[in-house]
Amino acid sequence: MDSVAIVTGGSRGIGRATALAAAKRGYKVVVGYASNKAAADEVVAAIAAGNGKAIAMKCDVGVEADIVDLFKQADGFGTLAALVNNAGVVDRTARVDEMSAERLTRMMTINVVGSILCAREAVKRMSRKHGGSGGVIVNLSSVAATLGSPGLYVDYAASKGAIDTFTVGLAREVSAEGIRVNAIRPGLIDTDIHASGGEAGRAQRLAHTVPMQRVGTAEEVANAVVWLMSDEASYVTGTIFDVSGGR
């Protein structure tokens, strides 16, 4: 199989689990990472140990030149068949009246602009309009997009609301060109993103608010992502799929 899947932010959490799951499904995986080369190399090694193929590539999705370079390098690895727009950031918890323009610009540049630019590069390669053979894009949103995250990070929630809208719009734009576009909205998932927001134990602390009474795992989200990437989801596009335990 010569099909390549690019997973941005693939060195940890949901991205890592997705990279491993995609490799098990036969994809050659490009593990994008912003700074933690050791973690990305570990993912590549884990895939190789399972007889899969993967490479790690440094890419800050907040920088357009990095994105362009990532896709150009991936071109030499095989035919791009899937993009998982997983890379994203959260900031320290704060009210809107405490947020700086610098914080907001960083949030939107990485979470929204970065995802759109990655999708742009993917469409250039996948679209039948451009001579491609089709493909799949899966965007990572968040249940925060529907809850708003008041008093925590409304800016993060807003960025994920933008991803929801972008997913629907792009899906309708390129569906006739052989590209399916969907999104996953994870709920409370046990990853280290919560530590980035200043509260490492947040997921466990709020587990009781989930109808299923527990937090989810990165692997449970990854399973949904790779299903959307597969032919089993061949008639699914423009869909935003909650993986949230009912939250």
Image: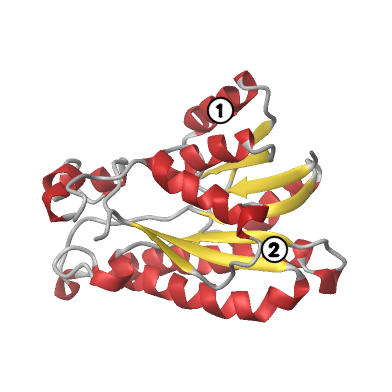
For disc 2, the neighbor class at 10 Å (few under 14, some 14 to 19, many from 20) is some
Please indicate whether residue 135 sits to the left or right of residue 96 in the image.
right
On the rendered structure, is 201 left or right of 91?
A: left
Residue 236, given in percent of the width and then of the height, sits at 59, 67
In the figure, 24 relative to 69: above or below?
Answer: above
The residue at which mark 2 appears reads as 121
Q: Quadrant of the C terminus?
A: bottom left
> Is 231 placed left or right of 152 in the picture?
right
The alpha-carbon separation of the residues under discs 2 and 1 comes to 24 Å
What label does residue 109 carry, if any?
none
- From this viewpoint, which residue is outermost toward the right? 131
For disc 1, the neighbor class at 10 Å (few under 14, some 14 to 19, many from 20) is: some
The x and y percentages for residue 222 are 47, 45
* Image height of 166 relative to 12, above or below: below
Residue under pointer 1: 41
| Residue in view at x 53 percent, y 29 percent | 43
Q: Amino acid at mark 1?
A: Asp
Along the line of sight, the residue nearer the viewer: 88 or 216: 216
What is the x, y in percent for residue 168? 53, 77
Say which residue appears at 69% left-offset and 63% top-offset: 121
Q: Residue at x 70, y 30 (%)?
A: 53
The vertical placement of 110 against 60, above or below, is below
- For the question of whether residue 17 can be seen, the reply is yes
Residue depicted at 61% across the width and 61% down the height: 137
Sequence-first tag of 2 and 1: 1
Residue 79: x percent and y percent? 80, 49
Q: Is residue 187 left or right of residue 87?
A: left
**Is residue 207 shown above or below 159?**
above
